[in-house]
Amino acid sequence: MILQARDIRKLYGEFCALDGVSVGVNAGEFVSIIGPNGAGKSTLINVLTGILEPTAGRVFFKGRDITGIGPVRLARLGMARSFQLVSIFPELTVLEVLQVAVVSRLRRGARLFASLARDREVAEQALEVAELFLLADKRTVPARQLPQGDKKLLDVASAFALQPEVILLDEPTSGVSTRDKTKVMEILVSASRRIGIKAIIQVEHDMDIVFGYSDRIIALHEGRVLADSTPGEIRANEDVVNMVIGRKGRKRSTC
Amino acid sequence: MKARIAVAAFALAVLAVPQLGRDYYSILMLSFFAYATVLLGLNLLFGYGGLLSFGHALFIGIGAYAAAVLTGKLGVLHMEAILLVAVAASVLVAAPVGALCVRYVKIYFGMLTLAFGMLFYSFLLKFYHLTGGDEGMRVLRPTLLGFDLSATPKVQFLIGPYYYYSAAVLAVAAFVMWRIVASPFGLCLKSIRENPTKAESLGISVNRYRWYAFVISAAYGGVGGALLGPTTGQVDPNLAYWTHSGNLVFMTLLGGFTHFFGPVLGAFVFIYLQDAVMSVVSYWRLVFGAILAVLVIFVPGGLVGLVTGRGVRPGIKAMRESPR
């Protein structure tokens, strides 16, 4: 397993957000985490990405204990994430946002007197990612001026520009119009193939997206793993259908 | 392109000022060279890094006192040595101070820098035997590039060799800073200003880069302070007083922190405006207070913002106005 969380407990004061959660992701997998509001999805993502230190339990990435090591070291080890709410650098242009990621990956951020404009490697790699995400035409546009859907794409694209082995996407299609959701997912999947990403983990509410793309689905409920199985088995699981997906199989949860 | 022409025209004008025969205005330019150097550094931290220091006069103090101690007490008169020591001393102080301050942002960062500034001010004031207390210390005339100019009359020295020397120091400082902000480091610093959480998730060590910016800006403060010393020939604790730090912030806002040369323009206008207002009325702070209020409310982009028409960019709006 490339990423593994063992017996994660996370308490916020009295409230138990995660209660003995064990999950794992293999190389080559596309895993979705689903669950109603308050199930612990965001907490789990934050524990997996080292932002939150769990009250108990450990997280392993490529066999290495990464519990609570923080986002900077995790990015260097090969894990990247995108955010639920669009997180970009508003005043930087599209290309600059991607260049930040490339500069970080190539460890060139401490070059104080080098000219960024003359660094062709950084420019080319940033442009490559912009092309993969269909943002190349807008490369000189400040990020804040992009339409909402493109901002979301840029957020995800910058995480991809790190060329991570594993990527965690927190609701990659939230805020994207229903019409464009499939387009976003197609871009994501083809970009991850091109970049060579080994595993994708996403939190998602749109069940069409979840069932359409996942190799495996992990359903959380009240801080515990309710089910961890293939889409087919999840669909047949009464508990999951009742508590998470809803009867019609398409109903979106409220969070 | 326009900016380049403006900068070239300004540089030529600067070189021509001593030829105009108005010695007083030429000497005022010396303050401008010193403050412009300080502000280039301060703006790396504020305009590019998003951290506003209210204690940067600390480093002006260090630079100026370095000049006084070297020339007055140790008999070292080489201006180049003074500049080097000013940079080294500033960096030495900024390294631990910065390491602590950059863990905080916004008002907490500002207050911490203010506190360290006042600490240094008190040190200068109270350690009389080392610093001369409130009387300060004399700065002897330095040699420039090894040339002993002690025979030259004071005004001729200041508007002649020292004028061009200071201008050259500013030019070099500006060139180096220009390189820094256009480097990969400059981009990372901007990304931290825009969104530190996102920058971290992309593997940028936020505090480390902020610390670099702090130390670099301190070195610029030291150089500016060292340039100020020989101009007045005297240093005193007020150089490190918090109102002096306030002036630096004023100059930055006046010129506009979103443009590379904004603070430089701010320093220029501040110095000549202060002189003009002081010659008319004694309560110049009242006038400047009103100007500051008008600036913050109507011209958040500063004078450069007025010229370039980028006065009210949303970025500034977000920094200036409280969220509704």
Image (spheres, rainbow, N blue to C red):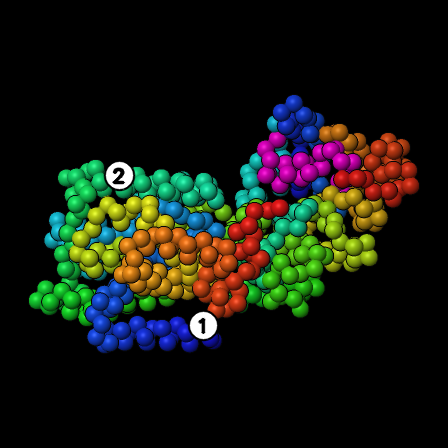
Q: Residue at x 45, y 49 (%)?
A: B51
Residue A218 lies, in percent from the top left, at 77, 38
A34 in the magenta segment: yes
Residue span colored magenta: A31-54
Q: Decide if residue B133 is in sight here.
A: yes
In the depicted view, which residue is nearer to us: B79 or B114?
B114
At x 59%, y 46%, the residue is: B323
Instruction: Tell me which corner region of the image, top left, top right, bottom left or bottom right, holds residue A12.
Output: top right
Q: Which residue is mark 2?
A: B122
| Nearest to the observer: residue B221 or residue B249 | B249
The percent position of residue A29, horizontal first and vertical second, equals: 74, 46
Identified by mark 2, the residue type is Ser
Identify the disc placed on residue B3: 1
Name the side, left or right, on which A132 lies relative to B5: right
Q: Residue at x 19, y 38 (%)?
A: B127
Q: Chain of mark 2?
A: B
Q: Quadrant of residue B3?
A: bottom left
Residue B16: give x, y in percent of width and height.
Answer: 27, 76
User: Looking at numbered disc 1 in the image, what kind of residue is underneath it?
Assistant: Ala
Query: Are discs 1 and 2 located on one and the same chain?
Result: yes
Q: Quadrant of residue B237?
A: top left
Q: Position of residue B306 (x, y in %)?
A: 49, 66
Q: Provide the secondary structure element on which disc 2 rests.
A: helix
Give B37 or B253, whichever is nearer the viewer.
Answer: B253
Number of marks: 2
Chain of the residue that carries numbered disc 1 in the rendered image: B
Q: Is residue A236 above or below residue A126?
A: above
Question: Would residue B10 appear left or right of A40 to someone viewing this image?
Answer: left
Few, some or many C-alpha atoms within 10 Å of disc 1 (few <14, some 14-19, many ≥20)?
few
Q: Is residue B94 above or below residue A7?
A: below
